[in-house]
Amino acid sequence: MKLMGIERVVFGVVDMAEGRRFLNDWGMRLVEEHAGCLLYQTADLGEIELMASTDPRLPKAIEPGSTVRELVWGVESPADLDEIESAVRAKSPGTPLERLRPDFLRLVDPMGLTLGFTPSKRTPTPLCAGQVADPAPRIDLEGKRYERAEPQRIGHIVFTTPDIDHVEAFYCTVLGFRPSDRYIGRAVFLRCKPEGEHHNLFLLKSPDAGSHMHHLAFGVRDIHEVFGGGMAVAQAGWPTVMGPGRHVISSCYFWYFKNPCGGAAEYYADTDWVTEKWQARELPQEPRYFSEWMLTEGVSRYDGVQRQSI
């Protein structure tokens, strides 16, 4: 089976007006509105769908309030759906599974999260090459500056869950995910294909007996867009959760904000790209392995004469 990445994330939202306002400020493109649904897209045609949390069409929630209700993974071709269906029936026969259409397969993972699988319609977007500065001296030219972000892709999603080993085993044994790195006994970074971005799914030990959405990460073009987009979102009044900063594991630059659709939303850029040669590391969950550097309350800017904290 050939998984391509996160295709669509469906949220059940308590306050649809706040969800709409956040995604507009986040830089997402509203492409469709009908029957109580709002459909947004990233630059590569990845989708975020918002529905009222009380909408009976939504799959069952893993937790109260606004949260992810369905996570859809893209596959390379319809034949991959047959392979996934066969793998689930053979290796996890108790898993709820249904073929809703010839091009759409749905199942429920060990966290109780509804997963969908469908041939991918996303279009590749350029990856940041890791440069903070331009490759050549700028002569009579300004450097890059972004007034707001335009999310390029949905890169990864994070959940907390009490039984990480059980969930990891399902994703790796049944769906073919691979571990990229782990915090010993506390968390695991998983990627959905042998070569690609460092992780598409991150599982953390839950602080309680339930599973919860932690955050959803959106790739942007470079560090300048992380800062420019983050400044715009902060100026719109959305609170910083943490950042900006730079992670140690995956090496990416980040900035997280509280997301009224559920959990947090992250801008990130310049993440590690790994292949089958990559050797997964086992590291203690300590601050030195979380971030190389990080601001904890956003950043400040000068607005005319007065210094304004955001």
Image (cartoon, helix red, strand yellow):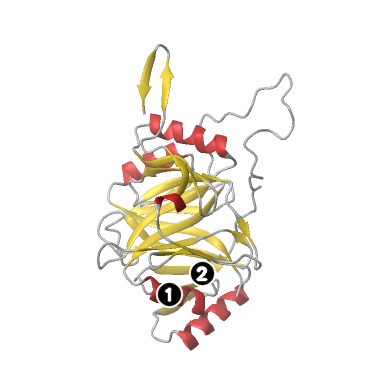
Density class for disc 2 (Cα within 10 Å; few <14, some 14-19, many ≥20) is many
Instruction: Give the side of residue 141 with respect to residue 91, left or right.
Output: right
Is residue 201 depicted above or below 142 in this figure? below
Spatial CA distance of label 2 from label 1 is: 9 Å
Is residue 65 visible to us here? yes
Dot 1 corresponds to which residue? 107
Q: Marks 2 and 1: CB-CB under 8 Å?
A: yes
Residue 75 is drawn in which quadrant? bottom right
Which image quarter holds the C terminus?
top left
Is residue 144 depicted above or below 74 in this figure? above
Q: Residue at x 52, y 54 (%)?
A: 155
Point out residue 88 in the picture as x, y percentages from the top left corner: 48, 82
Density class for disc 1 (Cα within 10 Å; few <14, some 14-19, many ≥20) is some
Residue 134 is drawn in which quadrant? top right
Which amino acid, mark 2?
Phe
Point out residue 131 in the picture as x, y percentages from the top left corner: 65, 40
Q: Which residue is drawn at 42% across and 13% down?
A: 304
Seen from the viewer's position, the closer of residues 121 and 214 is 214
Instruction: Give the side of residue 15 with respect to residue 204, left or right.
Output: left
Q: Residue at x 32, y 42 (%)?
A: 17
Residue 117 numbered mark, or none: 2
Seen from the viewer's position, the closer of residues 20 and 298 is 298
